[in-house]
Amino acid sequence: MVAPAANITLKLPHLYAKQREAVFDDARYSVVEASTKSGKTVGCIVWILAKAWEDGKPGRNYWWVAPTYPQAKIAFSRIKRMLIRVDAARQYWQVSESETWIELVSGGRIWFRGSDRPDTLYGEDVHALVVDEATRCREDAWHALRSTLTATKGPVRIIGNVRGRHNWAYRLARAAENGQQGMAYHKLIAADAVEAGVLGAEEVEDASRVLPNAIFRELYFAEPSDEGGNPFGQAAIQNCITDLSVDPVAVYGIDLAKSIDYTAVIGLAEDGSCCHLDRWQGVDWQQTRQRLVDLIGDTPALIDSTGVGDPIVEDIQRACPLATGFKFSSGSKQQLMEGLASAIQQEQVRFPDGWLINELSTFEYEYYRSGVKYSAPVGLHDDGVCALALAVRHLRVRSTATLEVRLIGVGDNEMDDERVWR
């Protein structure tokens, strides 16, 4: 048995500033994208020990979960070594080698589990959780783990190296980075660890020489490789980033909210630069309608009229005669997104950094037998992407129409003019 509780102080290893900020963030969910050997594991060891020591009571469980059981045992062994170093502290903790748990004097018990069998993770009540190497854990394991926090409302630290873009941890990181309620996002890279003295600069330099560049950037700078699922191209997106333009709006693209989505409004100037960028949610249709009418006025606008949007657009058109509806289908959305991809890759459109960049960067396409599906990953939004695509399309249509009108005036007689227009 563990010795009875007393006035005992647990002295934990020192963490460098960014490391401490990442794991001891006040947010319930802290998602930490980190380079290898940047201190993410040590930071979370300190965090889970502090939780089990300060908040622990008999019967309270704290979990450390890794992709496989052998990987979870690495953290188990490291915590044991940390505790064993202090001989006087041995009476204040006990360990089960067979069941892989450590129980502290508080009564809090830290368990070490693998996530490769998700069905075995259901059922327990967990008071704090670390998901280690999250990008290598199965998504259905995360679903099971989240269920263990329901009764306790326990906090979770999700840590790991970046591993491409097509995994649940990457999507959760983007949601956290985009300011989703209750979430915090942190990034620890090799440069942070070098500056803090926990990683040698020569080791990073050596890795840069022997590893493929994409893998090196993922492992040491937490930069995801472009796996080909993004239709715009990550480099092309970055090349289009600029400040919000002060030029007047030539056209608006508007994606109307459905369910928990956003109503997104993007205005483009004649040269394709973004001069209006806004989104909102949780507003009733009447308020949204009035807000859009006041904004659009006599400016051309292309508005998503799919489903419930159809009567809304008709209502807006009564006050804004240059507003037009656009119905989304699998075919029309494909054409719309291909047009946006072309504009981005040719730098014919420009936009400011922020939430729109997050949407563009996480947007995906997948090939099916029936065609191509364009959408945001599950749990994320693409309202801004759709609004931008609508604005780009309308700007091009408007430019083409202007050109045709000029050509009409060149004809020798009215019949010639009519033929040109057609």
Image (tube, grey):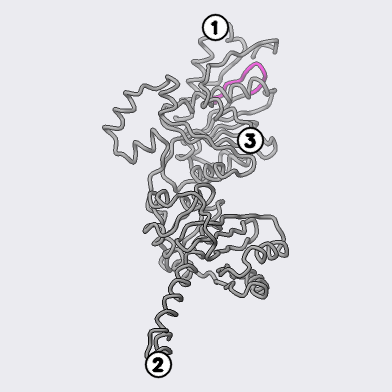
Q: Residues within 10 Å of mark 2 (few under 14, many from 20)?
A: few
Task: Identify the residue position indicated by label 3 in the image.
Answer: 28
Q: Vertically, is 104 above or below 403?
A: above
From which residue to which does the magenta span run? 99-108
From the image, which quarter does the C terminus lie in? bottom left
Q: Between marks 1 and 2, how big is the CA–CA gap?
A: 103 Å
Single out the residue that lies furthest toward the top: 88
Q: Which of marks 1 and 2 is nearer the N terminus?
A: 1
Task: Between residue 196 and residue 155, name the one nearer to us.
Answer: 196
Q: Residue 22: horizontal and vertical position, in percent?
A: 55, 30
Residue 64, how many percent across, how many down? 54, 30
Q: Nearer the viewer's eye, disc 1 or disc 2? A: 2
Which residue sits at x=50%, y=47%?
Answer: 353
Q: Is residue 350 left or right of residue 7?
A: left
Q: Name the residue under label 2.
A: 413
Magenta span: helix, strand or loop, mainly? loop
Q: Residue 412 carries which label?
A: none
Find numbered disc 2 in the image and state the secondary structure of the residue it sits on.
loop
